[in-house]
Image: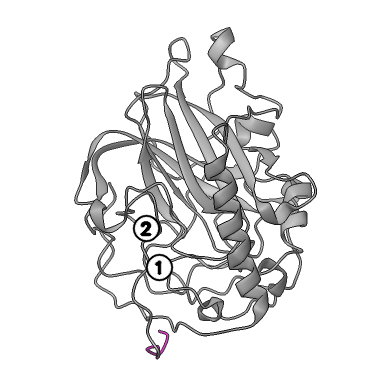
């Protein structure tokens, strides 16, 4: 694991009561999660992009994923949990990731720890909530959620015997100059401890991407639509390498064909070398137009797993007043 961040104080966010648009967004999240829970086949679609490993389970062939930069918004010590939303409003996303060993016969990498993190619907990352996402974004605290500034939309899951992990989250928003994406690391050799994952090594650092048609449908909805400005299309992104699933393009299936607010199921196969060690530098540009200006948390998340059950978000207590942003 990387070294802990220096002891800096995180400004707390206000829990504000705001307009019906964000309330509607939160309602869509709840409805979407209900749909996922009711469908036992959720997350079983296979990837269809070029360079895909979708047929790997049956053909015995798979593709080594492209390693790219981790970007500037990484934080050590994310919690082990399935649901990473913490009440953040957005279009529901049920994410299924399969980790396979490209050095053998595409065997599943059981026990691999898959870590993901991404921005919220307006382009803000937990731990860096004063970093401006560009365009006309509302202030991050205006979303009215009780999410913890240090932990929302970050988490680990440990792969089962099939090499599979699943996450419940939301479709990310955007920030200048990036396209819609999710960051991912695969770790092996460590173990769960104090609610997070410790030790071992990072085998793979990458990013997962959304096709323009899906992203643009989502960005017309609340709360995404309150972030005005120019969204970077995937072919213009500084990180995406244009090679379909092998470059991280998710296969996405809508829960409801005519109503994107109901959410999506996203799947991908990550082909990795379990013996490799990855520094997180990778190829591609940085994670944003400018270095983050938010203050990272002084205490990397380490709450016991029991305080953040996988069946529900782990909200912090709301505060009627916020400390001044640093």
Identify which residue, 150 or 260, lies in the foreground: 260
Residue 324 belongs to magenta span = yes
Residue 157 drawn at (x, y percent): 37, 41
Q: Find the residue positioned furthest to the front.
A: 38
Majority secondary structure of the magenta segment? Answer: loop
Identify which residue, 319 or 247, lies in the foreground: 319
Give the quarter of the figure containing the C terminus. bottom left
Q: Find the residue positioned furthest to the left.
A: 194
Residue 285 drawn at (x, y percent): 58, 51
Q: In this view, does 256 lie above or below 47?
A: below
Residue 300 drawn at (x, y percent): 28, 61
Q: Badge 1: few (under 14), some or many (20 or more) residues near its Cα, within 10 Å?
A: many
Read off the magenta span.
321-326
**Position of residue 5 in the picture relative to residue 155 (left or right):** left
Residue 142's tag is: none
If you read the primary sequence from the N terminus, does the residue marked by circle 1 or circle 2 appear first? 2
Q: What element carries label 1?
A: loop
Identify which residue, 26 or 291, lies in the foreground: 26
Residue 225 makes an appearance in the image: yes
Q: What element carries label 2?
A: loop
Q: Is residue 209 above or below residue 147?
A: above
Give the residue drawn at x 62%, y 35%. 247
Q: Which residue position holds label 2?
A: 75
Q: Are marks 1 and 2 in contact (CB under 8 Å)?
A: yes
Give the residue drawn at x 58%, y 8%. 59
Q: Which residue position holds label 1?
A: 127
Q: Distance between the residues labelled 1 and 2?
A: 8 Å
Residue 250 belongs to magenta span = no
Give the residue drawn at x 60%, y 39%. 266
């Amino acid at each position: 694991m990387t070294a802990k961040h220096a002891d800096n104080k995180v400004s707390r966010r206000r829990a504000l009561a705001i307009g019906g648009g964000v309330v509607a967004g939160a309602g869509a999240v709840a409805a979407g999660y209900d749909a996922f829970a009711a469908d036992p086949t959720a997350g079983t679609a296979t990837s269809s992009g070029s360079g895909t490993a979708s047929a790997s389970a049956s053909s015995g062939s798979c593709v080594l994923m492209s390693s790219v930069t981790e970007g500037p918004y990484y934080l050590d010590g994310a919690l082990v949990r399935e649901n990473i939303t913490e009440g953040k409003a957005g279009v529901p996303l049920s994410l299924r990731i399969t980790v396979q060993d490209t050095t053998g016969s595409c065997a599943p990498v059981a026990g691999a720890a898959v870590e993901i993190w991404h921005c919220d619907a307006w382009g803000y990352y937990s731990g860096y909530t004063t970093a401006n996402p560009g365009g006309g974004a509302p202030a991050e605290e205006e979303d009215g959620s009780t999410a913890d500034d240090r932990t929302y939309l970050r988490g680990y899951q440990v792969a089962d015997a099939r090499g599979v992990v699943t996450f419940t989250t939301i479709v990310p928003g955007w920030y200048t100059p990036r396209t819609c994406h999710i960051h991912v690391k695969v770790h092996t050799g460590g173990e769960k401890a104090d609610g997070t994952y410790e030790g071992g090594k990072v085998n793979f650092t990458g990013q997962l991407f959304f096709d323009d048609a899906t992203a643009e449908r989502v960005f017309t909805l609340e709360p995404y639509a309150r972030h005005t400005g120019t969204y970077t299309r995937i072919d213009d992104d500084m990180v995406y390498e244009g090679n379909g699933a092998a470059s991280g393009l998710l296969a996405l299936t809508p829960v409801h064909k005519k109503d994107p607010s109901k959410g999506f199921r996203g799947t991908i196969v990550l082909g990795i070398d379990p013996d490799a060690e990855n520094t997180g530098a990778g190829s591609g540009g940085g994670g944003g137009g400018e270095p983050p200006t938010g203050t990272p948390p002084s205490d990397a998340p380490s709450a016991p797993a029991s305080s953040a059950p996988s069946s529900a978000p782990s909200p912090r207590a709301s505060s009627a007043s916020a400390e001044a942003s640093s």
